[in-house]
Amino acid sequence: MTAPTITAAPTAVHHTLTLRALTEGLGSALGHEHRARLARDLAAVAEQGPDALDSRFPAAGRVYGRGRLPGWAGWSVEDGVRTRFLGQLKLSGTELAQEVTERYRNGDAAERRGVLCALPFLPLGPHAVHLTDDALRTNDSRLVAAALGPYARVHLDQYRWRQAVLKCLFTGIPLAKVAGLHERRDAELARMAFDFANERRAAGRTVPADLWLVATHDS
Amino acid sequence: MRIFDPHIHMTSRTTDDYRAMYDAGVRALVEPAFWLGQPRTHPASFADYFDALLGWEPYRAAQFGIQHHCTIGLNPKEANDPRCTPVLDLLPRYLAKDSVVAVGEIGYDTMTDAEEHAFAAQLALAVEFGLPALVHTPHRDKAGGTARSLAVVEESGIDPGFVVLDHLNEVTVTEVIGTGCWMGFSIYPDTKMTPQRMVGILKKYGTEHMLVNSAADWGHSDPLLTRITAEAMLDAGFDEDDVDRVMWRNPLMFYGQSGRLDLDGYNDVQAAGLYAGNSIARGGS
């Protein structure tokens, strides 16, 4: 007799309390009219599913604004709105990953950023790691930074994660934007960072100050 | 002096151009979708091109302090290739995007039935999405092509104030003036219009509904001819307010009708402190 296989349902990286904090942050950033409109839009997405996103997802910036989202470093209001939209879909795992992938592929840079920001809030398990891979291949620092959030912290393998951190150093993205830097840094990343610093010094160029967050002998 | 170039193909230009344009006063531009010199043979090539106009190119522009918007459309030249016409089905998805401020470039190249079909279908999309339309007038038989373009515009029912007829000259401007459409002029080193001739047109017809662009692309062209034309205006006795109207406020009014122009909005590239520290400004590290 074989033991029954228990397949856990795909989970989100963030706890629901984090989603509540996002909802509250968004509420404080939006005026009365926009809050009411968001409630209507969220209800429509929950009721009609992905089709309701076709017009709403691309327009999030011009409808709700692109200003900073209070309490969410590096986030804009449109990132928060898009995250809430995707959170209304009644899908999970590979099905949700498929839908999120379509939004990413058909999206402009802001929509792609919104999808990347939303990943840790969605019950995707590891099924969306191809999206962080895609973003990390770009040279657009908005996408690279968004791809290195909590979702990558949990789901990106160590080899690719080190390469991504090095890319941040290379392209001037502050390492403070990388989620889980202190828990995931290791001796190999320190070696890569030291080598990078050596190359920069040999060329008479400056070395990013935050390189020392990963180029430590104790890691 | 602040300049808004309402028609320039930055995909074909270098970062040196962006830097020189900023130094010359260019702070905003619109990049219309057009052909790339080499004909495309698959709709997917257009999708990648449109994605670049919505992603990589505005990102490049922002690093040099320039706001980038675009127009999306199937250009008349490639509208003749049946392998490309399925692009028309992709357009609604793109016309919903934030930084798309018009449908274009549409219009005629050789004035074929296929061009006319794509032209009319895209004017209908402009009406549906509440967007202005950028109409390219043909280089050959320009007078006949301009008249026929105006007829198609009228038939579509689009508000003429939402339409610009572009690449006009001394002859074709007479057909457009008084129609309510906007008039676009491309200043080129040798062909189309020169700064001096442009000043002559502005003196004769005034500055209302006039758009001046460099239309710089992959051919012999110059992204600084907007600035040189502005100086020629001042030399000819126009005042600074006239120059500001033609070079800044007119394009702002025309594309602003889309409701999507965002010139003082949040710029997360700069806000992230990456303006001088990114991969492009540093020459790719």
Image (cartoon, rainbow, N blue to C red):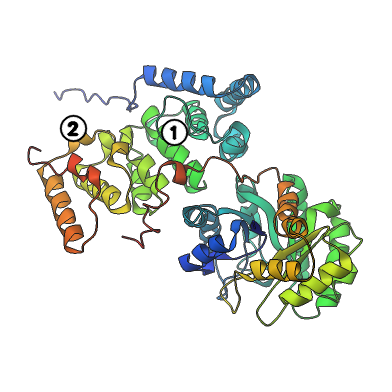
Left or right of residue B227, residue A161 in this image: left
Q: Which quadrant of the rendered structure holds the N terminus of chain A?
A: top left
Q: Residue at x 38, y 44 (%)?
A: A131
Q: Chain of mark 1?
A: A
* Cβ atoms at labels 2 and 1 below 8 Å apart: no
Q: Residue at x 14, y 57 (%)?
A: A198
How dense is the environment of label 2, judged by Cα within 10 Å: few (below 14), some, or many (20 and up)?
A: few
> Is B133 or B210 nearer to us in this picture?
B210
Q: Position of residue B51 (x, y in %)?
A: 52, 55
Q: Which mark is residue A75?
A: 1
- Residue ID at (33%, 41%): A129
Residue A183: numbered disc: 2
Residue B214 visible from this viewpoint: no
Q: Work out which residue is located at the far bottom of the displayed protein and give it.
A: B190
Q: Chain of mark 2?
A: A
Q: Is residue A63 left or right of residue A121?
A: right
- Which mark is drawn over residue B210? none
Quarter of the rendering containing residue B1: bottom right
SS state under label 1: loop
Give whichever of A4, B55 is nearer the camera: B55
Q: Quadrant of the C terminus of chain A?
A: top left
Percent of width and height locating residue A30: 57, 24
Dot 2: element = helix
Three-letter code for the amino acid on which mark 2 is drawn: Glu
Q: Residue at x 37, y 49 (%)?
A: A134
Q: Which quarter of the figure has residue A57?
A: top right
Q: Is residue A24 visible?
A: yes
Estimate the spatial distance between the alpha carbons at disc 2 and disc 1, rounded to whole Å: 23 Å
The type of residue carrying mark 1 is Trp
